Amino acid sequence: MKKLIFFLFGLSLFNLTFAQKFGYVDTQYILSKMPEYKEAQTEIEKLAKGWEKEIQSLYQKVQQMEVELKVEEVLLTKEMREERNAEIEENWKEVKEYQRSIFGFEGLYFLKKKELVKPVQDQVFEAVDRVAKNNRLQIVFDKSGDLVMIYTDPIHDYTDFVLEDLGLAENQSTGSN
């Protein structure tokens, strides 16, 4: 009796496994076709270059302070040298902290990127959701993500459907296969 129940249970799992329909999309390819994403990327790059330039300028100021200290070192008392060294060290700490506040985890760069890119990504995910429901897909993989897909049959590629849903369809193959 146990073998019969196990066999029936195993058979139903076997049938469920084959009953699921899946597909995949290439979100990087889809995003690259979206003007909003390109605009967001341009804005982020522009901000990053400005912040990099500002941080570089701050680094140069502290380096200049070090050069000036070396030049004047022989004229300064021990206390004056220690005071200037402490000031330089404090400036280095401030510059590095500022750099972390911009480019570190949860820094301004990260937050701005999230602010600009997330709405575009949300559009893609909503389109994927609609395509999945319209095509009765239970599972949709992202070909461009960390998931390694060694082989993909183009019949399961729903990238064009998502592009069409977003109004970005072209009369050519995606090239994302």
Image: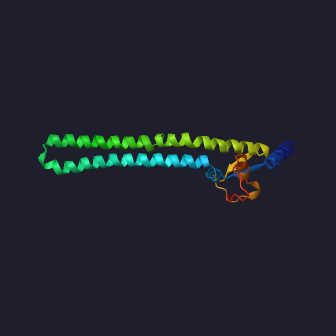
Residue at 42% x, 40% y: name it: 101
Occupied quadrant, residue 94: top left
How many discs mark residues in the rendered view?
0
Q: Nearer the viewer, residue 106 or 127?
A: 127
Residue 48 drawn at (x, y percent): 46, 47
- Residue that appears at 37% across and 41% down: 97
What is the quadrant of the N terminus in the image?
top right
In the rendered view, does 24 fall on the left or right side of 64? right
Q: Quadrant of the C terminus?
A: bottom right
The scheme the figure's colours follow is rainbow
- Is 81 placed above or below 150 here? above
Residue toward you, 35 or 98: 35
- Residue 112, horizontal then vertical, whole percent: 51, 41
Query: Left or right: 12 with respect to 110?
Result: right
Residue 116's spot in the image, x, y percent? 55, 42
Q: Residue at x 38, y 46 (%)?
A: 54
Give coordinates of residue 129: x percent, y percent: 72, 42
